[in-house]
Image (spheres, grey):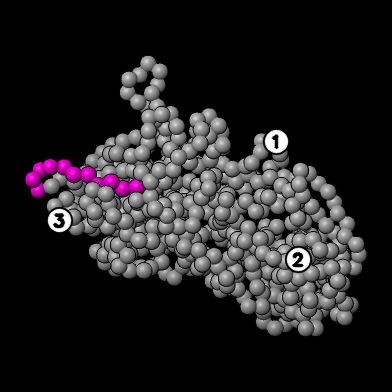
Amino acid sequence: MEIITEQGEHFDVPADYSFDFEFINPMLSEVGSQTAPGTLPYTTRNLKLLDYPQRFDRAKKYLIKRNVLLRVGTFQKRATQAVLKANEKDKIVTTFYMDEAIFYEKIKDVQMGAVNYGGTRTGTVRELFNLCSDVMFNRRVDDFHLFPVVAGFDGKKYTSGIWLNKIRIDPDTKAVSLWDQSTSQIEIDGTMVDVPFGFGITPFLKVSFVIKKIIEHFGYSVGESVFESDVSFKQLVLVNNVADAIVGGVLDYTQLLPTCNVSDFILALQKKFGLVFICDDTKKTISVTLIDDNISREPDVDLTRFAAELPRIEWHDNEQLKISAKTSITSAAPPCELLSDLVAKYGEITLLKNDYGIQTNGKLYYVAPENTIYRRYYAEGHIAASLQRFSPYFNYYSSKNKMMVEYASDDEQLPMFRNRIKMTKSDGNDVYNFFYVPTVPEIVLLNSSLVKEGDDIDNSKTTADIKMMFCFKVPELQKEKNSGTLISMGTTVKYDYPGEIWGNWSLRIAGEDGLYERFWRKYDMMIQSSNQMIYCNLNLTLSQLQMLNICTPKLLFNQPVLIERIKCKIGIDKFEITEAVFRTLREYQD
């Protein structure tokens, strides 16, 4: 066994030295593959290569982790070495992280804003304004999209909230443009305020771009990725509520990101979309796949002939998935936890392309482009009809009588509303343009301050937390109903402005087009009706083990199974699998 530093220096390792490795399926673990703690000799050379971990009389904090290469004959593996303790009595106790575990260790304590996203855009505010306008109206392809959202909308009055990326449609000529809000005052905190040119313009970074830059920042390239093959993932963006992103003549990508660690962001993607990040140590790539797609594949290898024993099964009670996300933004919270509870109370839901088909019969109607459920009815003793509005952001689980494994994503669900902008024609008549717009929390100012007349000006930048919020940009420009003008539209659903389907799935959890049906149903069925633990040791060579795709189902005694983990001992002239654990995929009937 050789342990080699990045500088090519070798540790002192006994001739009979070996490590206990554990290869773990990244679909079934948030930890990744690693070794059990092992002991290295307490030699002068090893202490030097590890920067003397036994000493605490140092000026700088000790670097616990470092990159190394593990090599045994033809087997070699990049790893992150972590020193657990070092003294003459216990010697040097260390462990090694591999594959996904290396990636998880690297991203654990890194803020989203600390990643290199390729610098900043600089120029005059007019140049940045024109750049954003070109991207918004599909005249230019860039790292981001733009579309209108309303910040701080109260869910009741059209006039509440502040528009970001506001669109202006000339009432006379129908010409469309990005609105320069400095031409008129806007209301902030109950006061009419003059704002600078560029105020209210903020790009929304593509999630595919952010993931690519994160992967590259930590020394990998992107392999296979659902963000390249699925149209909905291609159009997915991170929404923000920064109102002054370009007013200083600088567009800084780090100001457009959620306030969280990279690990929190990756975990939210895993819990929301069932994403699996698979590291290829040899190619230095990270592939982004889906857990439901992986377990649906046909078994690629029959491991029966490699079985060293008859399988042993451990039966346990089945569980179920609960999928949830945050709903703290005004009007995002649903009336009850489950969609099935609402349906049980009022009956099945009718899908509509617009709100004109809502009848006054007390039944439920889902207005697709608005991502909203409505119910119109006559309340007892009232002549006028009442209209109820329900958020569609229900959690999902199938039974209230079964143990749950909850996947709670850390992102905020965005309500949508049919909102309007009033314009006055040259003849004095008012006209209205209608938009389906996502709503976000109240505006954040990072590059400017609100100053009341007579107060001192504070030129320091402010800081504020930006929530994690996902949304789509509809690929094609949409025809606004009243003017017929083509506009940019953001949405949380797979439906466009006229209610036609453009995408593959929506950002609500429950429902036929929801996240559960697209990303979680097959995995949920696995843990509800199968997922029993099988122990069966294997007689594989080291090269055969390395060639296994651990995320693809296998056959074992003619039954489909998924590898959970394989433990083995590797040393000079020594390789032995000590434990192989599988999960059943066969559906067992109740």
Task: Give the image location of residue 259, x and y in percent.
Answer: 49, 53
Disc 2 crowd rating (10 Å Cα; few below 14, some 14-19, many 20+) is many
Q: Quadrant of residue 93?
A: bottom right
- Verify whether residue 435 appears in magenta: yes
Q: In the displayed structure, would residue 400 be above or below residue 474?
A: above
* Residue under numbered circle 3: 173
Q: In the displayed structure, would residue 422 be above or below residue 555?
A: above
* Residue under numbered circle 2: 554
**Which badge, 2 or 1, is on the more N-terminal residue?**
1
Q: In the displayed structure, would residue 431 be above or below residue 376?
A: below
* Residue under numbered circle 1: 401
Residue at 84% over, 74% down: 540
Observer-nearest of 423 and 480: 480
Residues at discs 3 and 2 in contact (Cβ within 8 Å): no
Observer-nearest of 253 and 337: 337
Disc 3 crowd rating (10 Å Cα; few below 14, some 14-19, many 20+) is few
Q: Quadrant of the C terminus?
A: top right
Q: CA distance from mark 3 to mark 2?
A: 64 Å
Task: Give the image location of residue 315, x and y in percent.
Answer: 83, 48
What amino acid type is highlighted by mark number 1?
Answer: Asn
Residue at 16% over, 42% down: 430
Residues at discs 3 and 1 in contact (Cβ within 8 Å): no
Residue span colored magenta: 426-439
* Mark 3 element type: loop
Q: CA distance from mark 2 to mark 1?
A: 32 Å
- Verify whether residue 312 appears in magenta: no
